[in-house]
Image (spheres, helix red, strand yellow):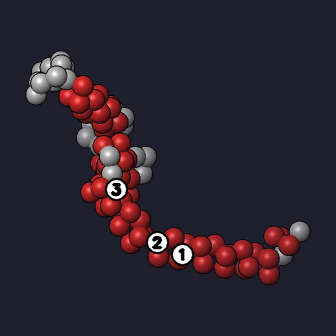
Amino acid sequence: MLCNMPIGKAYLSELTQTAAIQLEGMFVKSVEVISNAMDNGNVQDQLKAARLQMEATKRIGAAGASAIPAGDGGDRLERLAHRLIGLLDKQQTASGRTIDGDFQQTD
């Protein structure tokens, strides 16, 4: 009932504006957290941080779909990330400096 009254609508609008300002104010902290994960995290954390950074800058994700070149699926980065993790896991378990992997050349 209060939401339908002008004073209720104004109060909700004020709350929404305050929350939006708080979120904007945390942007610098978010960048620092992402940077810290990229510098000090494990491979999974680093890839997640890189993905967050690219989503925030609209290079990937639904909001940045136009930034993805034509012909590339939106999940291309995720497939590459999983491939990299797999190769790193194989490298860690390999007995020498060689990686047991496969190679595919694309045109």
The amino acid sitting under disc 2 is Met
Q: Are marks 2 and 1 in contact (CB under 8 Å)?
A: yes
Picture coordinates of residue 61 (x, y %)? 40, 46
Instruction: Give me the residue at 75% from left, 75% from top.
Output: 9
> Farthest residue toward the front?
95
The residue where tag 3 is placed is 37
**Please, what secondary structure does the residue beneath circle 3 have?**
helix
Of residues 49 and 4, the one drawn nearer to the viewer in this rendering? 49
**Please, what secondary structure does the residue beneath circle 1 have?**
helix
Q: CA distance from mark 3 to mark 2?
A: 17 Å
In the rendered image, the quadrant that contains the C terminus is top left
Classify residue 104 as left or right of residue 63.
left
In the rendered image, the quadrant that contains the N terminus is bottom right
Q: CA distance from mark 2 to mark 1?
A: 6 Å
The residue where tag 1 is placed is 22
**Residue 52 visible (yes or no):** yes
Instruction: Give me the residue at 54% from left, 75% from top.
Output: 22
The amino acid sitting under disc 3 is Ala
The residue where tag 2 is placed is 26
